[in-house]
Structure formats: structure tokens, C-alpha cells
Amino acid sequence: MKRVIAVTACLLTVVLGGCQTDATDGVVRTNEPSKGDVTSFGDAFDGLKTVSDVEYHASDQAVAEAKNQFRAENYGNAGALFFKATQLSPNDGNAWMGLAACSDRIHRFDLADRAYARALKLVGPTAEYYNNVGYSYLLRGKLQDARSNFLKAYELAPNDPTVANNLKLLSSSVQNIER
């Protein structure tokens, strides 16, 4: 038993001895070079970004492609790409917002509602969120709900031209209602 404890203690010492700790944030980093280290090409590491410095999400490329498809009004393709982005990075609020908007455009409001619920948890009650939900209700013909959400968006961003345009669109929808 004493022998197992001694071997375990030695292994922990070896494993922990290879780590570097930054005193400012308490995070253990093992991939950062020491001062004076050089690359295999003989260059100094100074000025090079390490993995911890780069803000990249696996969903970034899918979201960029999806936005291009959305702008081109290819809502089915955009929705598929936004869905892929949500699978790659489930906590990407922008991907969920995009998926919801695409679902609205292809009249899959059941999917839009689920995506908006997830987006709300991730991005919070922003003007963009309320504006998009309002537009979703406008597409469904639920004008009271659309107005309520557009007004919430307007309270958060009174100078946003998109929100103002959607409020105008809503008022014209009320005036030109078809029976």
C-alpha cells in the first residue's frame, strides 16, 4: 500500500512539474512557450499567438456561410448551415438566432419557437431578439404579439432603423388587413 502511494506521489510530481501557471488568472497552461524559446524555424515565439489568445468557435465558418445564404434569400440552405453551426457550437447564440430567422422564412414556426427559446437563454433579452420574435409573429399574422415584441425592441434601441421599419410595416399591416 505504501508503495502504491509513493508511486502515485511521484507520478503527480512529474505531471504537475510540466505545467506553467499564470499568477494573474490562476489558469494552468501547458501550450505556451517560455521566454526565449524558439520555433523549429529558429524564430522567437514573441509576438506569435498561442491557442489561448485566439477567439475561434467551430461554428464560425458555418455561420458566415449561412449569413451569405440568408442574404441571397436561400433560407433552406441558410437554415441547414445555421443548424450545423448549432451542432458544432451549442452555446453560439448568433447561430440559434439565425436558425430561428430561417425557420420563420420557411414558415416552420415550431422550429423557430424552439430556436428563439434557446437564443433567449444565450443572448438574453436584446433589441435584436425582440425585433426578430416580433417579425416572426408578424409573419404568422399575430399582430398583437408582434406589436408587443416590437415595442420591447424599441424601448431597448429607440434609434435602431430596423425596429422603426418593422413598426411601420406592422402599422401598414393593420391598416391593410385582408379578410
Image (cartoon, helix red, strand yellow):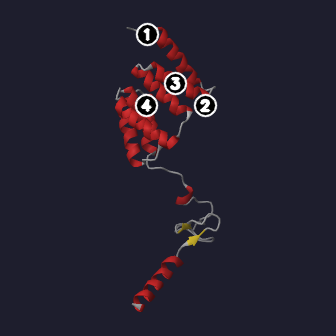
Q: CA distance from mark 2 to mark 4?
A: 20 Å
Badge 2 vs badge 3, beta-carbon distance below 8 Å = no
In terms of sequence position, does the residue under pointer 4 or pointer 3 come before the other?
Answer: 4
Instruction: Tell me what residue is drawn at x 57 percent, y 72 percent.
Output: 20
**94 in relation to 20, above or below:** above
Q: Amino acid at mark 4?
A: Ala
Q: Quadrant of the C terminus?
A: top left
Query: For the residue marked with disc 1, what is the amino acid?
Result: Ile
49 above or below 111?
A: below
Q: Secondary structure at mark 2?
A: helix
In this rendering, is residue 40 above or below 85? below
Q: Residue 177: which disc?
A: 1
Q: Position of residue 83 (x, y in %)?
A: 37, 40
Q: Nearer the viewer, mark 2 or mark 3?
A: 3
Q: Which residue is mark 4?
A: 101
Label 1, label 3: how far apart the Cα atoms are: 18 Å
Q: Secondary structure at mark 1?
A: loop
Q: Is residue 95 left or right of residue 127?
A: left
Identify residue for label 2: 156
Question: Nearer the N terminus, badge 2 or badge 1?
Answer: 2
> Can residue 12 be seen in this snapshot?
yes
- Which residue is drawn at the image coordinates 39% and 37% (left, top)? 114
List the residue tagged with mark 3. Answer: 148
Q: Is residue 22 left or right of residue 131?
A: right
In the image, what residue type sits under mark 3?
A: Ser
Q: Earlier in the sequence, mark 2 or mark 3?
A: 3
Label at residue 11: none
- Looking at the image, residue 166 lies above or below residue 33: above
